[in-house]
Amino acid sequence: MSLPPLPKASKGGRPFFLEDSDSERLLTMVVALTAEVSVLHDKLDSVMRVAADKAGFTPAEVEAFRPDPQAAEERARRRAALIERVFRILYADAERAAAAPGLSYEDIVALVAGEEDA
Amino acid sequence: MSPMPDAEEQARLDFAIALKGALRGPLKGALPEVYDSAAAPAWAETHGRRPQSWREVGEAMAGQRPYRWWSALMRAQQEFYVDVTAQVVERELPDLIGRYRRITAGPILGTLTLDPDLKLPPYQGEVDIHCVPGSYFLERTEDDVWAGARSDLGSFVFSMGRHGALNEDKGVAGAAFLKDRFPDLQVGRVLDLGCTVGLSTLPYCDAFPGAEVHGLDLSAPSLRYAHARAEALGKPVHFRQGDAEHAPYEAGSFDLVVSHILLHETSRAALAAIVAECFRLLRPGGVMLHVEVPVRRTEAFDQFMTNWDSLNNNEPFWSTLGEMDLVGPAVRAGFPEEAVFEAVVPTHNAKAGGWLGYGARKPA
């Protein structure tokens, strides 16, 4: 079946939220790349679990492998952790937003520097 | 009938679900505090008062970095999961069309009636709802079911499985709500408006055994898929392509006219026309029920967050619906004011919450 390619743009325009829309374009690439890292992790996980079961295995066996509930849960935990790692700075911003404002770094430098002995 | 992701595609979908889950966590959790401690005071400095409407909350939040990044990720996440589901169905399309042809060629329980001359109303034609390129209407080959299959897979991923294995929650919840509220209602014929692939239509076959169940939608690819899916699941449903504003059925021919998350994808004018059609289609004593996303919020900040999809996920009517008086259109359609209701339709599968139920009973 030969079909025209699926369209990639949705009718209705595309909102941008960041101050620089090119940064946001990069963000969408980071999301897709992070997904591919996650996909590779899952595939490697399948390979290792299949390999653990028997010495030799075929690519088809790896492809057909489906995690049991416990393995699926481990994968889910790793995925969530991956997301927190990649987007760590945003989580940090969120924490700062929720916390009471502390001293600025300049103030801290001044604080620890103390005053010269008279 | 459902499309089956391979191992790699499933891993991508799992990632999309994980990312969506993460975006409901601390990044979103910080936003009320960002609003209270930074956005609202900054807005108040230039306006002399704190924001009151959800639009003003939006103005106040627009400059806040945590909100901008959370939104940017939300949009990126939405586009990513749509793209992955689109690719899964694209790979499986020849097989899905084959299955559609095999299932519908055999002995069947229901029917499918398409109308190739149907014109799309502008509220569907001008925008790709949910940012799905091609929306519900992309047709590139004979017996194309791509848009229906993608919608089925997409709905399941989008709801993260919280709406039941067959994504049936709205239909199950709607039918249970109707039985509870109208215990005397005799149901022989049911019409589900804007049924898409029939996720919410099929539960009415189980809830009202023996009833004749009909589904109407604008989208031929969705209806083909819905027809094959219903047959594969052994549910007799009569699917028809048509416009809910001008439904191709006789007056007074249904005991129950329902819809599920249809209204927020229409327009103010279309909503009035659809409600008027419901009144026309119902027999005396029949009931109309629209099960909607819970668009009503009392706090301006909550309303703004609820409206995020309307502003940024191609759901243009959602925010207007949230503020609309829904009694008026029903009364103008002919329903007595005291017969019109807005109520919470308790969810069946999720742990908490509910859908917005909007409806009325036609006088006997």
Image: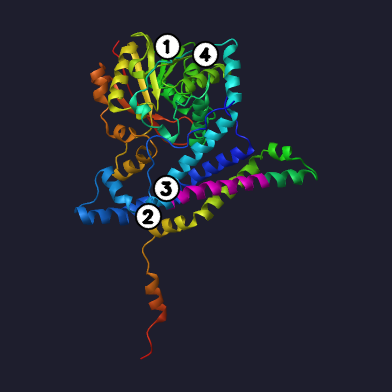
Respond whether the residues carrying marks 4 and 3 are from the same subunit: yes
**Which secondary structure lies at badge 3?**
helix
How far apart are the alpha carbons under marks 1 and 4? 12 Å
How far apart are the alpha carbons under marks 3 and 1? 46 Å
Relative image position of residue A3 (x, y in whole percent): 54, 28
- Name the foreground residue: B331 vs A11: A11
Residue highlighted by disc 2: B65
Q: How crowded is the residue under tag 3: few (<14 C-alpha within 10 Å), some, or many (20+)?
A: many
Q: Is residue A27 magenta?
A: yes
- Chain letter, disc 1 residue: B
- Chain letter, disc 4 residue: B
Query: Which numbered disc, 2 or 3, marks the residue that appears first in the sequence?
Result: 2
On-image quarter of the N terminus of chain B = top right
Q: Which residues are magenta?
A: A23-44
How far apart are the alpha carbons under marks 4 and 2? 52 Å
Residue highlighted by disc 4: B236
Q: How crowded is the residue under tag 1: few (<14 C-alpha within 10 Å), some, or many (20+)?
A: some
Residue highlighted by disc 3: B72
**Which secondary structure lies at badge 2?**
helix
Q: Amino acid at mark 4?
A: Pro
Q: Is residue B150 magenta?
A: no
Respond whether the residues carrying marks 1 and 4 are from the same subunit: yes
**Which secondary structure lies at badge 4?**
loop
* Mark 1 vs 2: CB contact within 8 A: no
